[in-house]
Image (cartoon, grey):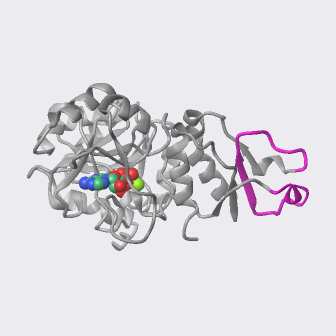
């Protein structure tokens, strides 16, 4: 694990629509500094993807293990192609269907991208985001940005500027505040370097949507800590709140004596006996649930929750990314 950098910045939080804010971000990035900024998925911690030194600051600020590669953000297919050595027809078809948007494509890495970005690997993940703040900064920089989620390693991803400040305040010079993220969970990651395209991380763009464009798409083997992983985002423990996360229904017997530290995340209203401030009802559809999930877990943590109990989600493709995140968040504690 990379050592966490000591707090040494007074972190400025700038509303993204302040005149000059995007220019200030681009200026810092051009100087090799870090900027946290909103994307449609979650807030990202950006650095100049061409610079080993700039990217090393991301690993330091996050305490991210050097073996966990970063996703590169680009503002066009042209910029994506600068980062990779091949652009197969599958990439062209997917970019046409889903870019700009929450889909990261893994392809063979070009020399422009230093090894630190890909954790020494020969492949790189690229994505073209749709969020106007990220796009505005990319347009001003005109170089690709390495941008993992702007949280400390293994912790919950941030979907609001306040979440970034909680985790990285004092460790980075600037956070652009663009309000809450519209998607709320990390991008779908698809590996295009093998014979058959392989889903490495499910996201809001579902396996079914990818199959509709490409035909055969494999799903990477289930999450486990045993053996080598193709994508470190597959590590079992990831995306965790501070509280212990449990998956399952709240037993009827527990409802009468709702224990102090237990919060519930559900898609239905609280039973009358349950303290309403410890029951969080989220929308009963995957888009709405994803948009609110991390913010809700951040709030549970702030309220000192010891246990967050999440009621089971439907076993369908459109809920797969959320089941994946919750399974990982509940592992290893
Ligand atoms: P995040 O921290 O949310 O930006 O997630 C980055 C994740 O993207 C990693 O944990 C990996 O799962 C995935 N990823 C990035 N680059 C690669 C790559 N070259 N090969 C496979 N997976 C990658
Ligand atoms: Mg992350």
Q: Which quadrant of the rendered structure holds the C terminus?
A: bottom right
Residue 255 is inside the magenta segment: yes
Residue 299 locus on image (x, y percent): 64, 51
Decide if residue 33 is in sight here: no
Image quadrant where residue 178 sits: top left
Q: Which quadrant of the rendered structure holds the N terminus?
A: bottom left
Image quadrant where residue 33 sits: bottom left
Q: Residue furthest top?
A: 96
Residue 300 locus on image (x, y percent): 66, 54
Judge left or right: residue 76 versus residue 162: left
Residue 180 locus on image (x, y percent): 51, 37
121 in relation to 227, above or below: above
Q: Residue at x 52, y 37 (%)?
A: 318
223 in relation to 110, above or below: below
Residue 23 is inside the magenta segment: no
User: Within the displayed image, which quadrant is ligand 2 positioned in?
Assistant: bottom left
Judge left or right: residue 266 versus residue 99: right
Q: Residue at x 85, y 60 (%)?
A: 254
Decide if residue 120 is in sight here: yes
Count of marks overlaid on the render: 0
Q: Residue at x 66, y 35 (%)?
A: 284
Q: Residue at x 52, y 48 (%)?
A: 162
Write the start and end of the magenta stretch as one range: 251-273
Judge left or right: residue 35 versus residue 259: left
Q: Nearer the viewer, residue 79 or 169?
A: 79
Residue 158 locus on image (x, y percent): 49, 49
């Amino acid at each position: 694990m990379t050592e966490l950098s000591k707090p040494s910045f007074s972190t400025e939080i700038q509303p993204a629509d302040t005149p000059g804010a995007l220019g200030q971000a681009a200026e810092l990035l051009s100087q090799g500094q870090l900027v946290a900024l909103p994307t449609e998925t979650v807030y990202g911690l950006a650095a100049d993807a061409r610079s080993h030194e700039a990217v090393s600051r991301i690993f330091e600020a996050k305490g991210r293990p050097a073996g966990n590669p970063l996703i590169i953000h680009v503002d066009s297919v042209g910029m994506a192609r600068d980062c990779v050595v091949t652009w197969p027809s599958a990439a062209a078809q997917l970019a046409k269907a889903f870019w700009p948007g929450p889909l990261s494509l893994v392809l063979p890495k070009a020399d422009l991208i230093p090894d630190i970005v890909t954790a020494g690997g020969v492949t790189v993940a690229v994505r073209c985001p749709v969020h106007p703040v990220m796009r505005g900064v990319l347009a001003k920089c005109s170089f690709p940005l390495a941008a993992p989620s702007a949280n400390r390693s293994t912790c919950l991803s941030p979907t609001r500027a306040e979440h970034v400040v909680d985790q990285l305040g004092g460790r980075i010079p600037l956070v652009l505040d663009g309000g809450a993220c519209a998607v709320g969970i990390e991008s779908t990651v698809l590996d295009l370097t093998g014979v058959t395209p392989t889903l490495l991380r499910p996201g809001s763009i579902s396996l079914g949507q990818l199959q509709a464009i490409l035909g055969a798409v494999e799903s990477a083997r289930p999450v486990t800590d045993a053996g080598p992983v193709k994508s470190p985002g597959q590590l079992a423990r990831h995306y965790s709140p501070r509280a212990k996360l449990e998956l399952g229904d709240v037993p009827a017997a527990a409802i009468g004596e709702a224990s102090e530290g237990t919060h519930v995340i559900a898609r239905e209203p609280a039973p009358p006996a349950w303290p309403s401030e410890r029951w969080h009802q989220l929308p009963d559809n995957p888009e709405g649930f994803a948009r609110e999930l991390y913010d809700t877990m951040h709030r549970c943590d702030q309220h000192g929750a010891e246990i967050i109990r999440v009621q089971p989600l439907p076993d369908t493709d459109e809920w797969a990314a959320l089941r994946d995140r919750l399974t990982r968040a509940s592992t290893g504690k």
